[in-house]
Image (cartoon, rainbow, N blue to C red):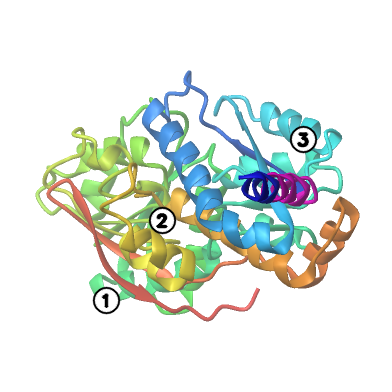
């Protein structure tokens, strides 16, 4: 009995010592997911938190073997107040966070990066050209707009010889996608018939319907977020010859976004190019993802969104980098990020089809574009 007690005490003490020697890696997860948002919801926030928790849980044992543990902190802000992204990042850097996982939207991520003050950051989904120009310790998990445009232009060219653009002037990534599309389209003989710029969630659609009716474009480029895109489609789908709508990463999918939330137009047909395939496709591309897929029936809150898929990949990539390079403090971690840049797009461009208010995955295409 005495020997058993001694062995038990030794085991407990060993566990305490081992646990105390794990190097903490503080990570701040900052996203526009405030409950006050009109573009978000408690469901999105819950999925986000669940994806981070799941990613840490599935990487915990590997991290422990390598001598690390991740300390996560969530900081959600209002989508209408980009300054909060700067403030949250500034505070995280001040607190000594090793890594900041930033917003999915390009303009918010760019604001966040300015507040990071030498702290490495990575966006889950930002894709504008300005994001890719940051370089150094800042990166994104999404393919660039240029890569998505290359695929989108090929689709438009097969559909028609003409297009018309409807662009959200408040959206950096949307404007960037539109400019990239114009440049690429001119190189393959696609003719642009015109453009309308919209502002805010409730823009004035007067004249848009008549303009498209008169010009009769085969394709309407709609590189905007899902809420505004659904309203444009509603205005144009009843035309005698409705165009094919062509979208970028903002339309969402069959689980997330306003086009599949019961208010999407029913007759509209379209194609959207996105940075991520469905989770059951994307998770197959790395080991932790495959384990999650294997356990799908046993876990609650399966990560359906592209953002969640990206979060799991980020935590897994962080684990791999820590275990391989073994930084023991933030300064060495930052130097490691600058040198090896472990966070980067890891898949091609995903093509989805919109039909009968449902967005469904079609295929993955590779796009080789020089940056």
> Which of labels 1 and 3 is toward the front?
3
Q: Is residue 94 above or below residue 241?
A: above
Whether the residues at callouts 3 and 2 have beta carbons within 8 Å, the answer is no
Choose the circle earlier in sequence order: 1 or 3: 3
According to the picture, the residue beneath numbered tag 1 turns out to be: 158
Q: Residue at x 68, y 33 (%)?
A: 85
- For the question of whether residue 203 can be seen, the reply is no
Quadrant assignment, res 81: top right
User: What is the crowding at mark 3: few (fewer than 14 residues within 10 Å), some, or many (at least 20)?
Assistant: many
Q: Please state the horizontal and vertical placement of residue 275, each as a whole percent of the image.
A: 45, 61
Which stretch appears magenta?
A: 9-23
Q: Secondary structure at mark 3?
A: helix
Q: Please state the horizontal and vertical placement of residue 14, each as a whole percent of the image.
A: 73, 51
Q: Nearer the viewer, residue 178 or 111?
A: 111
According to the picture, the residue beneath numbered tag 2 turns out to be: 248
Q: Residue at x 43, y 63 (%)?
A: 289
């Amino acid at each position: 009995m005495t020997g058993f007690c001694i062995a038990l005490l030794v085991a407990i003490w060993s566990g305490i010592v081992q646990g105390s020697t794990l190097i903490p890696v503080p990570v701040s997860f900052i996203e526009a997911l405030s409950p006050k948002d009109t573009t978000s919801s408690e469901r999105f926030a819950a999925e986000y938190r669940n994806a981070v928790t799941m990613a840490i849980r599935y990487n915990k044992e590997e991290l422990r073997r390598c001598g690390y543990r991740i300390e996560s902190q969530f900081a959600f802000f209002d989508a209408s107040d980009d300054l909060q992204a700067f403030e949250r990042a500034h505070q995280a850097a001040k607190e000594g966070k090793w890594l900041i996982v930033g917003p999915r939207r390009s303009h918010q991520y760019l604001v966040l990066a300015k507040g990071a003050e030498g702290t490495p950051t990575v966006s889950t989904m930002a894709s504008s050209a300005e994001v890719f120009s940051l370089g150094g310790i800042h990166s994104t998990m999404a393919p660039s707009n240029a890569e998505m445009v290359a695929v989108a232009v090929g689709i438009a060219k097969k559909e028609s010889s003409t297009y018309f653009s409807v662009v959200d002037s408040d959206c950096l990534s949307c404007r960037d996608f539109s400019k990239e599309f114009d440049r690429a389209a001119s190189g393959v003989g696609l003719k642009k018939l015109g453009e309308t710029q919209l502002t805010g969630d409730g823009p004035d659609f007067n004249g848009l319907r008549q303009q498209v009716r008169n010009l009769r474009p085969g394709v309407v480029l709609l590189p905007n977020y899902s809420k505004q895109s659904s309203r444009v489609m509603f205005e144009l789908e009843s035309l005698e010859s409705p165009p094919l709508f062509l979208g970028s990463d903002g339309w969402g999918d069959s689980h997330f976004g306003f086009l599949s939330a019961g208010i999407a137009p029913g007759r509209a047909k379209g194609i959207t190019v996105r940075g991520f395939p469905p989770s059951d496709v994307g998770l197959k591309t790395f080991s932790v993802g495959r384990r999650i897929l294997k356990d799908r029936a046993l876990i609650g809150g399966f990560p359906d969104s592209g953002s969640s898929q990206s979060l799991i990949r980020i935590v897994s990539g962080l684990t791999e980098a820590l275990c391989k390079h073994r930084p023991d403090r933030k300064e060495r971690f930052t130097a490691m990020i600058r040198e090896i840049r472990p966070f980067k797009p890891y898949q091609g461009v995903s093509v989805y089809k919109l039909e009968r208010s449902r967005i469904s995955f079609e295929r993955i295409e590779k796009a080789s574009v020089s940056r």
